[in-house]
Image (cartoon, helix red, strand yellow):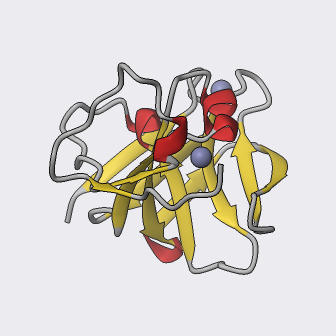
């Protein structure tokens, strides 16, 4: 079974995952742009029991457009988000793909908030586009 380590930029907060992600998605929404400092986010979902967390994290809850509450855990020393969960869905955990710093990580198959996508960003043709997102 593949084991992959993820960490914040200083290495204090870490997550180790066993097995491949359930799915990998990118999101172009403004909240993801601001959270990551990048022009879109990329994240991988795993079953909660496949993830081991080490280190100390600080939580930030963001309420999504549909009312869902997302609980992000970031390193208090360097600020990188290492994982997040949607409240009420304790079975899954999402980890930013960049936290793995692994160019061979499985590619995304879903693209969310296409309306917010920067015009110069292009993705492979096999990525499913969600075009009905709220603006
Ligand atoms: Zn850190
Ligand atoms: Zn987003």
- Is 45 displayed left or right of 64 in the figure? left
Instruction: Between residue 11 and residue 113, name the one nearer to us.
Output: 113
- Rendered image quadrant of residue 44: bottom left
Residue 41 lies, in percent from the top left, at 50, 38
Report the front residue among 72 and 119.
119
Percent across and percent down for residue 126 are: 16, 53
Ligand 1 quadrant? Answer: top right
Which of these two is toward me, 50 or 68?
A: 68
Residue 100, quarter of the rendered image: top left
| Residue under the image location 62 percent in, 38 percent down | 32
Residue in view at x 61 percent, y 21 percent: 37
Q: Quadrant of residue 3?
A: bottom left
Tell me, yes or no, if residue 133 can be seen here: yes
In the picture, the quarter occupied by the N terminus is bottom left
Name above or below for residue 126 compared with residue 80.
below
What residue is shown at x 25% (from left), y 43% (from top)? 105
Q: Residue at x 51, y 50 (%)?
A: 95
């Amino acid at each position: 079974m593949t084991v992959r380590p993820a960490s914040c930029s200083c290495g204090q907060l870490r997550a180790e995952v066993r097995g491949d992600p359930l799915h990998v998605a990118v999101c172009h929404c403004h909240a993801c742009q601001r959270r990551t400092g990048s022009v879109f986010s990329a994240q991988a979902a795993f079953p909660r029991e496949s993830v081991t967390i080490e280190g100390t994290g600080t939580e930030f809850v963001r309420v999504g457009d549909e009312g869902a509450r997302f609980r992000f855990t970031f390193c208090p020393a360097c600020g990188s988000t290492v994982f997040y969960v949607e409240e009420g869905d304790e079975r899954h955990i999402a980890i930013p793909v960049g936290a793995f710093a692994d160019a061979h990580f499985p590619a995304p198959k879903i693209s969310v908030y296409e309306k917010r996508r920067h015009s110069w960003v292009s993705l492979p043709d096999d990525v499913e586009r969600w075009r009905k997102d709220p603006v």
